[in-house]
Image (cartoon, rainbow, N blue to C red):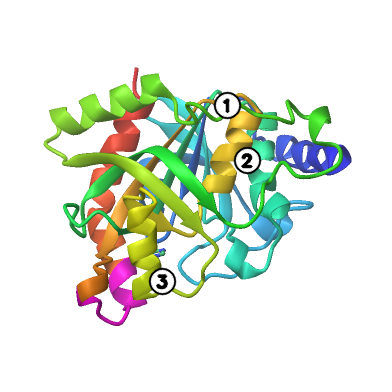
């Protein structure tokens, strides 16, 4: 893995990807933040050595370097998911590259289903903690200790300072921001009624198919991380309607200005 990281890094540096302060991962239907960035460089994932290639239609698959609110940012427009068939190490490789590029902080967005029925579709949720139901760890490989601790502490996986700031930014801008527990599942099938009931019982407020492995790797790299979900559907086991992926993507798109406001506020100062 060390050699692969070095080769990806050398390629990106040769393309001018130098000294970003923030890394940003844009989730399903959340690509519009890019319109607020003064773009300096962009490169398709498919051109980056050792990068997986995104296969999901709603994820466009580009790494972008630019300026947001006067800060240098590197943005993943589109992320990788387990359900695309990649390994958990492959989907988190880009996080290791962002860290190698020099980012100091990582901002993650995703679309998720609302398990907590007090939360409504279109609402935002700050991820305060998570449950890993993705069936593996991105740290379960032989040479893990070459990159950081093997037994990574997860007592506070999300950065308290950035969380506080996100809550302040939400308040200033009249954005309703819940705080809760995200459970990561593999997907790509949605959950059954019994599974939604189970997820509620184990303490989840939202469910999605990403983020958890990225956050584990960020913690491995001692990279402060924040993650925000757009809640795109209400997962009520007693009143469950067939899933409409187009609607999920549309709801994420409608909530996007709120995500843009939050992320801009986090990067500012
Ligand atoms: N389940 C899993 N992932 C999701 C959901 C859901 O209900 N909604 C958006 N992403």
In front: mark 3 or mark 2? 3
Residue at 33 percent of width and 64 percent of height: 197
Q: Residue furthest left?
A: 174
**Residue under circle 1?**
223
Q: Secondary structure at mark 3?
A: loop
SS for tag 1?
loop
Q: Position of residue 133 (x, y in %)?
A: 54, 55
- Start-end of magenta stretch: 239-249
* In the image, residue 247 lies in the stretch drawn in magenta: yes
Q: Label 1 vs label 2: CA separation?
A: 10 Å
Residue 63 shown left or right of residue 16 in the figure: left
Ligand 1 found in image quarter: bottom left
- Direction from residue 28 to residue 217 in the image, left or right: right
Callout 2: CB less than 8 Å from ligand 1 = no
Quarter of the image that includes the N terminus:
top right
Q: Which mark is residue 95?
A: 2
Residue for badge 3: 191
Instruction: Residue 169: tell me if it is visible.
Output: yes
């Amino acid at each position: 893995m060390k050699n692969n990281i070095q080769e990806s890094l050398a390629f990106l540096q040769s393309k001018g990807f130098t000294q970003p302060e923030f890394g940003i991962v844009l989730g399903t239907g959340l690509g519009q933040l890019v319109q607020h960035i003064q773009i300096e460089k962009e490169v398709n994932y498919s051109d980056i050595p050792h990068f997986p290639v995104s296969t999901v239609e709603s994820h466009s698959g580009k790494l972008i370097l630019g300026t947001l609110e006067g800060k240098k940012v590197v943005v993943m427009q589109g992320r990788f998911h387990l359900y695309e068939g990649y390994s958990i190490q492959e989907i988190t490789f880009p996080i290791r590259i962002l860290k190698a590029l020099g980012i100091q902080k990582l901002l993650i967005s995703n679309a998720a289903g609302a398990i907590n029925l007090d939360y409504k579709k279109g609402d935002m949720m700050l991820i305060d903690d998570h449950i890993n139901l993705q069936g593996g760890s991105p740290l379960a490989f032989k040479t893990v200790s070459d990159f950081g601790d093997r037994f990574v502490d997860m007592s506070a996986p999300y950065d308290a300072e950035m969380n506080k700031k996100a809550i302040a930014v939400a308040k200033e801008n009249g954005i309703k921001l819940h705080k809760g527990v995200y459970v990561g599942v593999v997907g790509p099938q949605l959950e059954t009624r019994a599974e939604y009931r189970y997820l509620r019982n184990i303490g989840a407020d939202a469910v999605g198919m990403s983020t958890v492995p990225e956050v584990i790797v960020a913690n491995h790299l001692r990279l402060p991380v924040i993650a925000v979900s757009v809640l795109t559907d209400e997962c009520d086991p007693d009143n469950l309607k067939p899933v409409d992926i187009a609607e999920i993507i549309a709801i994420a798109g409608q909530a996007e200005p709120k995500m843009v406001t939050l992320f801009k506020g986090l990067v500012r100062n």
